[in-house]
């Protein structure tokens, strides 16, 4: 298997077929058996004509009809089982690709989502994965069709060398021309999927912000944006459809020419007495039968063209470089929670130095919100600093695996989404097994929220928590972070949508539940900052002052402007 950084569309296709090798082999054998039976039908009919009908032999006629009936039973069984194997291989490959894509997108190292909207990633994990999975079906159908063509050629060679050569020489030429004709379809199919994914992403983006759009009266602008995107997607789809229609029409025309050549040559041979009447019927029947396999091969060419385009898009996601790479160090046991930033530069941060003691409840006020975001990215190891180091208990974060780091240090971002489920299941999503979330729910004010909901903690939550108000969503997200019980917790503006009384209660609750564990509140809320042990003021990407909240209020004008405005 290729490494992710070297993965290409061809690798994805190879691995997809290899992963379902058993079903592909079984389906190909059964399909080939079906094609063999199909090819034998006109041969048997020719034998019936030569040995029973021409000689008026009733007994022989009945015997050959019984043979034909047995062949048709075999055809039905082989078709059923080969179709089952093909569908199963396609579905399992699609499932495997979806899992691989989701695992890559959710990888702690990140990077797969860079430059791609969530809707585009969803389209790749559904439509593109489906098209690549269908390659298994196309491979089986192609092998079976080639078997049918080969059997027909052998039978025709035994009947007449000329007839056999027409098929044996004409089929490779037909396949080569079909491959050439599929090239425009491949490029246009890739463009079609790209545009469709973008349209899907824009639609998802607009739906997510529907309330905001209505609030600012931006519906017409949003509609115009989506109309333009959708029109581009439609144009790409139509171009792909035209390419597919052209490819199918041309291949069908070429196939008809080959079949006509077989029928013409067979008719002349029969007229010259070189083959019998039964053999002529068999030859014409085989020529008509060949229409099926050759149409299948044309379809296979189109499917492979679309599959290659989709496989390239999947490979781009799977091979996307990680934003951060895992280190080989391990966390200290137990995790004390001492955090140190030394000379950290990233974005707006410039040589930031900061020491956070184990068990400290620290407030951080940034005069520029972008600097707060940069700090959170460093602490969460969403990216490594351009210069400087961030350490946890003396171990640089860049030396740790991001997944292991997040078992000790959790960064709860301001815009964290909720998931479909219930209020309680959202709170317990990251909680240790068997942990009781009640304390976290009380500290975050979720207990009060539950009292106002129809089914309390078991009330259903819609996608991204849209069925809850902004303040309710914030409290559930905060409770989820508290219930995780990480040794180090960093929370960003968790109470911007709640009233002052509720905010004061949450501040007290957070202090109580996090007693003895390191907690960082990145916020400008006076209520939250008042319960911290001390507050750090970030100006111009550096620490310019640190003291208890009350002291900074009295002595620092910039601080007052940041938290009291």
Image (cartoon, rainbow, N blue to C red):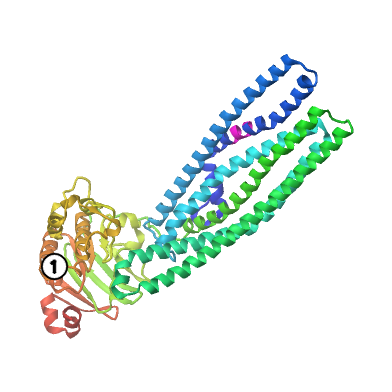
Residue 181 higher or lower than 492, as above or below: above
Horizontal side of 52 relative to 416 (left or right) equals right
Viewer-closest of 417 and 14: 417
Relative depth, front residue between 170 and 376: 170
In percent of width and height, residue 510 lies at 14, 62
* Residue 267 is covered by the magenta coloring: no
* Overall secondary structure of the magenta section: helix
Quarter occupied by the C terminus? bottom left
Evaluate whether residue 97 shows in this view.
yes
Residue at 21% x, 66% y: name it. Answer: 494
Residue 137 position within the rendered picture, expressed as x and y whole percent measured from the top left: 56, 42
Q: Crowding at label 1, few (<14), some or many (≥20) Cα neighbours within 10 Å?
A: many
Q: Nearer the viewer, residue 275 or 327?
A: 275
Specify whether residue 112 is in view.
no
Residue 264 falls left or right of residue 308: right
Mark 1 element type: helix
Q: Which residues are magenta?
A: 28-33
The answer to whether residue 133 is above or below residue 28 is: below
Q: Quadrant of residue 519?
A: bottom left
Q: Position of residue 246 (x, y in %)?
A: 66, 56
Residue 346 is left or right of residue 135, and the answer is left
Q: Which residue is mark 1?
A: 503
Residue found at the very far right of the displayed protein: 272
Rendering coords of residue 172 (x, y %) = 73, 45
């Amino acid at each position: 298997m290729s490494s992710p950084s070297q993965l290409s569309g061809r690798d994805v296709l190879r691995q997809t077929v290899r992963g379902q090798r058993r079903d592909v082999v079984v389906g190909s054998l059964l399909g080939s058996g079906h094609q063999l039976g199909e090819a034998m039908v006109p041969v048997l009919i020719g034998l019936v004509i030569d040995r029973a009908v021409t000689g008026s032999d009733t007994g022989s006629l009945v015997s050959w009809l019984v043979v034909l009936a047995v062949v048709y039973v075999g055809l039905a069984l082989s078709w059923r089982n080969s179709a089952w194997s093909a569908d199963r291989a396609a579905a399992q490959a699609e499932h495997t690709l979806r899992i691989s894509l989701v695992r890559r997108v959710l990888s702690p190292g990140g990077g797969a989502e860079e430059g791609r909207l969530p809707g585009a990633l969803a389209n790749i994990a559904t439509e593109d994965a489906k098209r690549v999975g269908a390659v298994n079906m196309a491979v089986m159908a192609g092998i079976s069709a080639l078997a049918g063509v080969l059997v027909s050629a052998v039978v025709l060679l035994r009947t007449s060398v000329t007839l056999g050569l027409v098929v044996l020489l004409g089929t490779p030429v037909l396949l080569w021309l079909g491959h050439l004709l599929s090239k425009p379809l491949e490029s246009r199919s890739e463009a079609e999927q790209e545009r469709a994914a973008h349209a899907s992403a824009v639609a998802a983006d607009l739906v997510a912000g529907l309330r905001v759009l209505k609030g600012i009266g931006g519906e017409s602008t949003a509609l115009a944006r989506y109309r333009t995107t959708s029109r581009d997607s439609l144009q790409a789809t139509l171009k792909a459809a035209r390419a597919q229609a052209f490819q199918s029409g041309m291949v069908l025309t070429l196939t008809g020419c080959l079949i006509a050549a077989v029928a013409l040559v067979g008719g002349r041979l029969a007229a010259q007495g070189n083959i019998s009447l039964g053999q002529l019927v068999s030859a014409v029947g085989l020529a008509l039968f060949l229409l099926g396999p050759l149409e299948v091969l044309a379809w296979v060419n189109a499917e492979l063209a679309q599959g290659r385009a989709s496989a390239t898009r999947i490979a781009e996601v799977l091979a996307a470089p990680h934003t951060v790479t895992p280190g080989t160090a391990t966390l200290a046991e137990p995790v004390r929670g001492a955090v140190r930033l030394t000379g950290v530069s990233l974005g707006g941060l410039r040589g930031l130095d900061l020491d956070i003691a184990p068990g400290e409840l620290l407030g951080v006020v940034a005069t520029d919100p972008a600097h707060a975001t940069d700090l959170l990215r460093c602490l969460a190891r969403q990216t490594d600093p351009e210069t400087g180091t961030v350490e946890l208990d003396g171990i640089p974060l860049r030396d740790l695996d991001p997944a292991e780091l997040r078992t000790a240090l959790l960064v709860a971002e301001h815009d964290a989404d909720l998931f479909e489920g219930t209020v309680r299941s959202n709170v317990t999503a990251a909680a240790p097994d068997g942990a009781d979330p009640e304390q976290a729910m009380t500290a975050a004010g979720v207990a009060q929220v539950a009292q106002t909901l129809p089914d309390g903690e078991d009330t259903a939550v819609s996608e991204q928590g849209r069925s809850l108000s902004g303040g309710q969503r914030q409290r559930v997200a905060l409770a989820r972070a508290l219930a995780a019980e990480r040794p180090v917790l960093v929370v960003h503006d968790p109470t911007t949508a709640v009233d002052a009384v509720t905010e004061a209660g949450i501040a007290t609750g957070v202090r109580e539940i996090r007693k003895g564990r390191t907690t960082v509140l990145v916020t400008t809320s006076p209520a939250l900052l008042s319960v911290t042990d001390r507050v750090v003021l970030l100006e111009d990407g550096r620490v310019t002052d640190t003291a208890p909240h009350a002291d900074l209020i009295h002595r620092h004008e910039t601080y007052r402007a940041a938290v009291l405005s």
